[in-house]
Amino acid sequence: MPPLSPQRAARFPFVPWFQRCAFAIALACVPGVAAWAQAAAAEPAAQVAGRTPSGHGFVRPKDWTQSRRGSAVVLQAPEGGSWIALVEVDAGDAAGAVAQAWQRYAGRAAPELSMTLPVANRNGWVDGRSYVYRAAAGEPRQLSARAMRSGAQWVVRIDDLANAVAGKRQADLNLIRDEFVPAGHVRESFAGRKARRLDAARIEQLKAFVRRSQRLLGVPGLSLGIVQGGKVVYAGGFGVREAGKPEPVDADTLYLIASNTKSLTTLMLATLVDEGRLRWDTPVAEVLPDFKLADAQATAQMQIKHLSCACAGLPYRNLDWEFAPPDAPASIVFDILARMRPTSAFGASYQYTNPPAAAAGYVGAHVAYPDLELGQAYDRAMAERVFAPLGMTRTTFDFDRAMRGNFARSHGVGIDGGLELIDPRRDRQMHAVRPTGGAWSNVHDLLAYVKLELSGGQLDDGQRFISEAALRERWKPQIATGRDAWYGLGLDTDVSSGTPMLFHGGRLYGQRSNMAWWPQHGLGLVILTNSSSGNVLMDALPRKLMELAFDAQPEADSMVAAAAAGEREQRQARRREWTFPAGKERAAALAPRYRNDLLGELRVQRSDGALRFAFDAWDMPVASRLRADGAVEFAGAIASPPFPLVAGRSATGRTLTLRDAQNEYVFVEAE
């Protein structure tokens, strides 16, 4: 699941949106939840609650330092050189508030503006607006400001962060953002309340919300399923499989569910644990003696559970497999891991990363079928241990099979601002790392999985599929993702609303999905969409369901409206900033061919003034822009493009440099 830059919305899968409440409420939630709370309670204790001069509440994460600059509270990350400032100002509007805040925080005007985006009302703040800036040329840095109002007062949160820090401190950033509330604000809580029955009238309200959202966001197709009390109360589709074509989506339509595959993978692992064939604390090298990371100590520490917990300090690293040939073997995962080393200590920081999660599935499959190739073993383990017992008859890792019938095509926003199909070759790169995100599934099949989670491991016919203890071991906290939220083993949990919600989201090029369930209430849902423009629905649809089930405060429509407006502004900003075609002069400065030892070859193709970059597995038309320092950046003129490539020179010739949050890849001119 690729990360999304600030220009492409939120980076990480399904950041919790609920307003917070006391963590201790979790103690009474569902059977076994006391163990979760006791295991996670130590982490919030290391956090420090604070107040701005006017009494607005915030939480300082563990190991961050705090200082004051007049009316600004400044929090500094442990690594140094990265700050978040909370600045109170008296202003007439958001723009004026932001201008004042930069002067008070940095003693200067705001950096060069890239775009400004609306923000949904939440946590007691209203009229929010986000400002995204360009960092100094060549500086890998994230700069933004968010103005929000409570009563007559404006408060601005300035994020001034090195990319590497932002990449590994996402849980801390969530905490600062989600725990910043106006003075006197009373958080919403559903503790002790019983969910209402989702009768026909409430289902119609939910369907109306889907239709409104679909129009605003331009999502071609969306499939939705809801279970309550062990029964499917709704399963259906809205819209079409492919924009401009009549075939509708429904509850049988297959979507690429991306990182929702992780939850299914850890379920397979749990069956092996339940049978005594594996332990969560089994060292990985005990199962696969050739397993190694780039750090020997981390290799020795790595247990099976560490592969799935986002808690082992390993950074996000996707590009190694996103550029690999589509027929790359499963062993590529272990080649990537051999190049990875922790950027934080075990258990110190939530870092969502895909190669370890893929390895978890392959390690478990090797235990189940040691004589088979890793990919074949995984496919068989999932088919026999998860899909067949649960009746998930359409779920598959076979792209050809999935794309022969009723399936949803991937859509995204192109360089011209319009919706376009995404090259399916890019999706196929996921197959080599499929335990982390390569399953195709539909609403009916995923509801069967959600029902299993809600039943504590029993199938519809009353037979026990897995022990409740083994199933719910995956729910337990492994690493905090917020004050009252954590990541388990391929599953997120948020208890901040007073009633636990378990979930996992999935993002891949042009596909968005989410599964969520509330164990106390026997309530769950599945959302599948076929467009990146439906990103906000991963959060907004669960919120709307909560509004209907608990008569909660209305927030979902505001979330969608803000996201739709923000999407329009991002499209306009992209059109302003990038030149397409890239321009003959800029294209002429490129070498004919480049190579990177990890990502392979990059061939530069020119035809009738158009420029294309061709990689080993796929290609793309290219746009360009000129940076303030004179360097030229090239980006894919496609929906959901990879990170831009910066043209430069080295001692050996011309270069193109590609960076994500914590990694750099240099393509060097080749003969």
Image: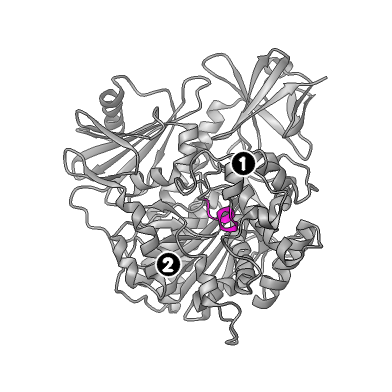
Magenta stretch encompasses residue 309: yes
Magenta stretch encompasses residue 529: no
Label 1 secondary element:
helix
The amino acid type found where label 2 is placed reads Leu
Residue 534 spot, x, y in % from top left:
53, 52
Residue 218 appears left or right of 252? left
Q: Name the colouring of the figure.
A: one colour
Number of other residues with Cα within 10 Å of mark 1, as a class: few under 14, some 14 to 19, many 20 or more: few
Picture layout, residue 620 above or below residue 492: above
Secondary structure mostly taken by the magenta-highlighted segment of the chain: helix
Label 2 secondary element:
helix
| Res. 245 in view | no
- The residue at the point 38 percent across, 72 percent down is 549
Q: Quadrant of the C terminus?
A: top right
- The residue at the point 41 percent across, 47 percent down is 562
| Res. 181 in view | yes
* Residue 296: image tag: 1
Residue 603 appears left or right of 74? right
Residue 512 spot, x, y in % from top left:
57, 54
Residue 624 appears left or right of 210? right
- The residue at the point 21 percent across, 44 percent down is 56
Instruction: Judge by depth and name the residue closer to the eye, 323 or 265.
Output: 265
Residue 448 spot, x, y in % from top left:
59, 74
In primary-sequence order, the first of circles 2 and 1 is 1
Picture layout, residue 638 above or below residue 650: below
**Picture mark count:** 2
Pointer 2: what residue?
Answer: 545
